[in-house]
Amino acid sequence: MAEAIADTRRLFTKPQNLNDAYGPPSNFLEIDVGNPQTVGVGRGRFTTYEIKLKTNLPIFKLKESSVRRRYSDFEWLRSELERESKVVVPPLPGKAIFRQLPFRGDDGIFDDSFIEERRQGLELFLNKVAGHPLAQNERCLHMFLQDETVDKSYTPSKIRQA
């Protein structure tokens, strides 16, 4: 019985020049969630987050955009992707029900540490979703990332590359 010998030869790669090493990547998609702002008073109080997108992917109509979204907008995006796409959608950071109870010793869902923790979770969620090639074809994702307002009565469809 002959033993199989592993092929340990290196793959041939072309030499890399400075432009290849330090030039812009061939395809990139950067999404940052930041600059949280709490607005309103009483029961009408909520926090919005700025979503900045930079990309050179041809499927996105704008190469740079900045929009503000609140947590309920993220919930809408997640439910639309679950309903319309064949993508396994990651979970959002939790709703923090106990932080909304009255008579707490802190600011509840408006506490700086909670807002920062939620911001990180929302950024992770968006980068996972937007990085998926099938999700990139969904109109709801493009609207969420690049349109000033989210039209929740839109007609679901796929985005076609130009």
Image: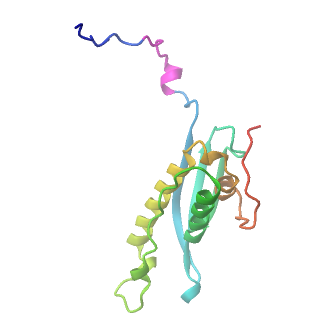
Is residue 83 toward the left or the right of residue 97 in the image?
right
Residue 48's spot in the image, x, y percent?
57, 69
Who's the residue at 71% across and 61% down the image? Answer: 148
Question: Is residue 18 highlighted in magenta?
Answer: yes
Q: Residue furthest bottom?
A: 103
- Residue at x 59% of width, y 82% of height: 40
Residue closer to the observer: 110 or 150: 150
Query: In the depicted view, which residue is nearer to us: 113 or 85?
Result: 85
- Residue 87 inside the magenta-drawn segment: no
Q: Give the x, y percent position of residue 58.
A: 69, 37
Q: Quadrant of residue 97?
A: bottom left
Up-down relation of residue 132 to residue 70 (above or below): above
Is residue 38 placed above or below 42 in the rendered structure? above
Across and down, in percent, residue 57 comes to 64, 38
Q: Position of residue 107 (x, y in %)?
A: 41, 82
Q: Is residue 107 above or below residue 158?
A: below
| Residue displayed at 52% across by 52% down | 88
User: Where on the picture, by quarter, is residue 145?
Assistant: bottom right
Left or right: 99 with respect to 129?
left
Which quarter of the image is occupied by the C terminus? Answer: top right
Which quadrant is the N terminus positioned in?
top left
Which colour style is shown?
A: rainbow
Q: How many marks?
A: 0
| Left or right relative to 128: residue 103 | left
Task: Give the residue at the far front of this rendering.
Answer: 1
> Seen from this angle, which residue lies furthest top?
2
Highlighted magenta segment, given as a residue range: 12-22
